[in-house]
Amino acid sequence: MKISKIAAISFVAMLSACVTLSEKGAKVNYYTKQEPPTGCKQLPEMLSSSYNVDEGTLITDMRNKAGDMDANFMVLDTIVIKQNEHQPQPQYSGTGRAFKCP
């Protein structure tokens, strides 16, 4: 059985939109233009990339990943929006740093 490109893209878009904030992710405060308070320990850098979603979904995904690392503070360093002529929806990707603060 063949699946058309449109059906496959629609399915991926539907799955991508299903990101909800986890319990751990809800405990992560995030900032875009602020460094963490003194005494915070930086954890390994994280990267999140999602197709066919919005900026809010990207941030939710990154907060969930930071929460899974037991972080409670995240600095969102970059958000890049790429438009592909072959896809109607833009791709959002972001990088950030996770911290464990007292």
Image (spheres, grey):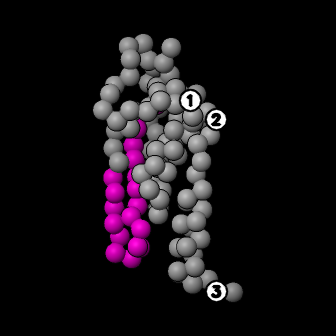
Q: Mark 1 highlights which residue?
A: 27
**12 versus 71 height, above or below:** below
Q: Is residue 43 visible?
A: no
The residue range painted magenta reads: 80-98
Residue 12 circle label: none
Q: Residue furthest left?
A: 33
Distance in Å between CA atoms under marks 1 and 3: 43 Å
Q: Mark 2 highlights which residue?
A: 23
**Which is nearer the eye, 67 or 54?**
54
The image shows residue 92 at horizontal and vertical percentages of 40, 56
**Which is nearer the eye, 66 or 53?**
53
Task: Please tell me which residue is depicted at 61% across the width and 33% down the height of the picture.
Answer: 24
The image shows residue 75 at horizontal and vertical percentages of 39, 32
Q: Earlier in the sequence, mark 3 or mark 2?
A: 3
Residue 2 circle label: 3
User: Amino acid type of disc 2?
Assistant: Glu
Q: Residue furthest bottom?
A: 1
